[in-house]
Image (cartoon, grey):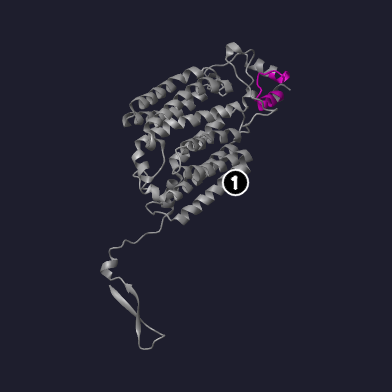
């Protein structure tokens, strides 16, 4: 080490030590840090946003759009996807900012960018604030205020209440499940759908065909029971999904000081997963078709994936081993996309054979004329554009 001496101006003729300069041999041990390139910065932003989780959030929001009986424009659709992604990015970044010392203690999270100091906390905070403001603003300006409020609420619940509760109480999982169940409601409201019943939007029950008379009025699907059914599906699905994962990493959670049910009571953790796996059966076979989201055929086709996942949850509760937890978790990964695909297949009012051009209805033109001349008929309650185009053709 080379000592640097400077002249002491207050005492002439005397010198004082100022600082030590490392020798060239010592400084050679340090590696020069390069500036973050734009591609690296985008990668870091993706890691802060938990890109895979954010993609899942956007897809579940889009499922709410797809299952809505109301029409949506392309700009509204793209704005909903962008706003939802930004809200998710902000919530995940704020979550990581608060959990750096705890993430450093777990093997699953110790390579996150803030833990390994790949990006500064100030930079990450700026990214979180920018996405947290722009996301709700896009939803407010391009979609509607209800969707924007849901997006902002998700940021507050996840980055605020849920993150704080993880070290305080086991009920953090229930709050986290609410957070995961809100994106489909954002997609529903983006189309103009209603969340709460009113005199203009009363709750309507779509009974099985043998109990109902007359054709189905698709306009009545926009009632508060439909988004509630969607919410319950996503809410209950997260318990077999997360409880299986938390059982596998419970040692890391315990080391970091998180109060998870899998840490405090593995037996109750398995029981909660089983209860919600069983609850998914009436949700899919009764509540969803009763709300009008799907036809009653979905009540039967959904029994197959529900039966597989319920059996896996029962095995996990009965044995309680890591093998059973891993199997239940893996089943939960394919369960949600399969269930969404089945819901789209059995969506109320959609004839996929006609839509794909496989079959044609010989009476289509006659029905269009009837719809044109007798608007009170329930032949096409949701397609005003079709009626206007027919008026131009038939004059």
Image: 54 above or below 228 = below
Element under disc 1: helix
Residue 268 in view here: yes
What residue is rendered at 33% in x and 80% in y? 5
> Is 123 colored magenta in this rendering?
no
Image: 26 above or below 113 = below
Q: Quadrant of the N terminus?
A: bottom left
Q: Nearer the viewer, residue 339 or 224?
A: 224
Report whether 373 appears left or right of 117. Answer: right
Residue 148 location (% of width, % of height): 59, 41
Residue 343 location (% of width, % of height): 51, 24
Report whether 45 appears left or right of 18. Answer: right
Quarter of the rendering containing residue 31: bottom left
Q: Of all residues shown, which one is farthest toward the bottom?
A: 13
What residue is rendered at 33% in x and 44% in y? 107
What residue is rendered at 54% in x and 30% in y? 231
Circle 1 Cα neighbour tier, 10 Å, few/some/many (<14 / 14–19 / ≥20): some
Residue 144 in view here: no
> Is 378 colored magenta in this rendering?
yes
Q: Quadrant of the C terminus?
A: top right
Q: Nearer the viewer, residue 29 or 203?
A: 203
Q: Which residues are magenta?
A: 371-391
Q: Of all residues shown, which one is farthest toward the left?
A: 25
Report whether 110 appears left or right of 380. Answer: left
What residue is rendered at 43% in x and 40% in y? 52
Image: 288 above or below 36 = above
């Amino acid at each position: 080490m080379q000592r640097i001496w400077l002249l002491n101006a207050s005492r002439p003729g005397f010198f004082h030590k100022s600082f030590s300069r490392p020798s060239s041999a010592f400084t050679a041990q340090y590696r020069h840090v390069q500036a973050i390139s734009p591609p690296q910065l985008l990668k870091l932003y993706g890691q802060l946003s938990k890109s895979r989780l954010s993609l899942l959030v956007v897809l579940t929001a889009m499922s709410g759009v797809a299952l809505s009986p109301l029409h949506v424009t392309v700009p509204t659709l793209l704005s909903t996807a962008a706003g939802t992604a930004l809200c998710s990015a902000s919530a995940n970044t704020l979550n990581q900012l608060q959990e750096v010392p705890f993430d450093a203690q777990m093997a699953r999270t110790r390579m996150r960018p803030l833990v390994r100091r790949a990006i500064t906390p100030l930079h990450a905070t700026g990214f979180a604030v920018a996405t947290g403001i722009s996301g709700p603003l896009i939803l407010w300006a391009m979609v509607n205020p209800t969707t924007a409020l849901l997006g902002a609420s998700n940021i507050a619940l996840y980055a605020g209440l849920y993150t704080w509760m993880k070290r305080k109480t086991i009920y953090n999982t229930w709050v986290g499940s609410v957070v995961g169940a809100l994106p489909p409601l954002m997609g529903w409201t983006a189309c103009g759908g209603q969340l709460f019943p009113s005199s203009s939007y009363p709750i309507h029950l779509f009974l099985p065909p043998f109990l109902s008379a007359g054709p189905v009025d698709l306009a009545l699907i926009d009632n508060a029971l439909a988004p509630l059914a969607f919410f319950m599906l996503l809410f209950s699905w997260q318990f077999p999904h997360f409880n299986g994962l938390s059982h596998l990493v419970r040692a890391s959670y315990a080391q970091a000081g998180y109060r998870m049910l899998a840490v405090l009571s593995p037996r109750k953790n398995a029981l909660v997963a089983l209860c919600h796996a069983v609850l998914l059966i009436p949700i899919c076979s009764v509540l969803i078709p009763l709300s009008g989201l799907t036809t009653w055929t979905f009540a039967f086709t959904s029994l197959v994936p529900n039966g597989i996942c319920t059996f896996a949850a029962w095995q996990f509760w009965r044995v309680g081993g890591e093998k059973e937890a891993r199997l239940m978790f893996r089943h939960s990964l394919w369960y949600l996309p399969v269930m969404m695909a089945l819901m789209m297949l059995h969506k109320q009012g959609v004839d996929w054979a006609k839509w794909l051009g496989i079959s044609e209805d010989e009476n289509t033109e006659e029905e269009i004329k009837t719809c044109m001349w007798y608007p009170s008929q329930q032949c096409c309650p949701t397609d005003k554009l079709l009626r206007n185009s027919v008026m131009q053709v038939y004059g």
